[in-house]
Image: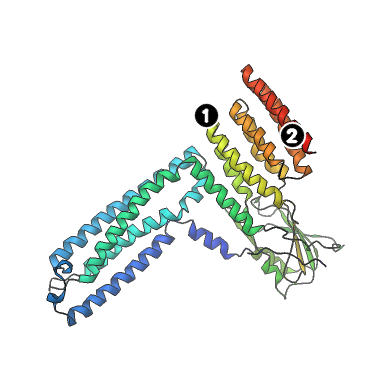
Amino acid sequence: MTTPRRSRAPARRYDKFLDSLRASLWFRPALWMTAFSGLALGLVAFDTWLDQRLDPQDIPRLLRSHPDDARALLGAIVGAMLTVVSLGFSIVMVAVVQMSNAYSPRLLRLYIADERNQHVLGILLATFLYSLIVLRSVRQSGFAPTVATNVGVLLAIFATIALIAFLHHVPQSLKVNSIIHLILERSEAELDRAFPHAIGIGCEPADEPADEPVRITAWRSGYVQIFDIDPLSEPKLSGPMVIRMHWRMGDFVLEGTPFASVRGSFAGRDRKALERSCVIGTERTMRQDPGFGTQQLTDIALRALSPGINDPTTACAAIDALTVLLAKLATRERVSSWRCDRSGRIRVHFRTVTFAELVETSFMRILVYGAQEIQVVLRLISACEQLRHVVGPPQQATLRELLQAVHQRAREQLSIDAHRRTLAQELARAHASFDART
């Protein structure tokens, strides 16, 4: 008997919460501010203890701090950090608007979640708060926190270095190749994490219960983001059941519409468990939805081919990334669409996106708007030739249909005879390579 295969890292409902934290601009800065605040309070307490037991003359002259000097120095750091923080947030907002206008509004979440930007803003804010707390401890009576003041200078230097790195990173991150690589990297990582090879093998039921299916309606409207089968593994649930989902990850569901059909034992507590297993949100995310990466890359290509931008080179870069992602997604199409819990008692059947649907929603859409650009057309032909080496016969038939669509669409759109001859030569070579393989 085949042992059922489950994902090595099953999704949890708290994944949604963790994703929201990572994508927020406040979480990592808040951690930095908390750490620096604790450091400031600790060093001030240490300086107070040191002041009672150490003669100021024993402190090296270079490290001594007079109250007036410490107040002026810390005040300068406070003012400078506040100004730089305002500048940093302004740069981030300008970059976000630029990315949204130039590429796709669906990239906003991906860019805001950039860890480097969040850490730099956190360091700047934390240095400001540290200096403010230490400045508050400087007293007219003559006490100046020597160690805390000198550490404040070191933190200001550290913040300056972080600012320089930030100013270098922001323009680099706005380069289209950097954005495409980031989308591809995140999509591949999520694909490997959530959909390992052979997942679901052994979960296929020999026969489903013959009773009438119970239809479950969606309990809220939104996009399906996460599905965790563990809540359906609780021993207190009813007997064996087969759950067939009516949606795919990333689909929009409307409250009150059919969500799933269940055959077998099913009670009210089972419905609650089903609702706990599924997270529905207001937007699509890459969590358990690597196909969302293909949409983002397609958006970049279509925006680049719009008359206002007319940048076929960027579209070709997006096609190259789509080729890599489609090749990897094609290998996952061969795994089972069934899932079971650890005991194999409850089985769930998902609707999965097919290779043909991905090609239609990516390459076919790009062809509609890019058929007049010979550079884009040739890149699509090249993508078909490369993908044929890693896909099976059914997927190769889809690639042949794409080549036929390229032939029909491009012949109508290309107006230069030399481009038409090049198209004919490349199509003939591509078809010959397909025939030679088969």
344, 406: nearer the viewer: 406
Q: Quadrant of residue 31?
A: bottom left
Residue 283 appears in the figure: no
Q: Count all numbered tags in the image, as a single digit.
A: 2
Label 2 Cα neighbours within 10 Å, binned few <14 / some 14-19 / many ≥20: few
Estimate the x, y position of residue 85 in percent, counting from the top left. Answer: 32, 53
Give the secondary structure at mark 2: helix
Residue holding disc 2: 433
Q: Quadrant of residue 95?
A: top left
Q: Residue at x 59, y 51 (%)?
A: 187
Estimate the x, y position of residue 408 in percent, counting from the top left. Answer: 71, 26
Estimate the x, y position of residue 29 in percent, counting from the top left. Answer: 39, 60
Looking at the figure, which quarter contains the N terminus?
A: bottom right
Q: Say left or right for 6 vs 315.
A: right
Looking at the figure, which quarter contains the C terminus?
A: top right
Q: Quadrant of residue 366?
A: top right
Mark closer to the chain start, 1 or 2: 1
Which amino acid, by three-letter code, is at mark 2? Ser
Q: Which mark is residue 253?
A: none
Residue holding disc 1: 310
* 15 w.r.t. 292: above or below: below
* 168 w.r.t. 75: above or below: above
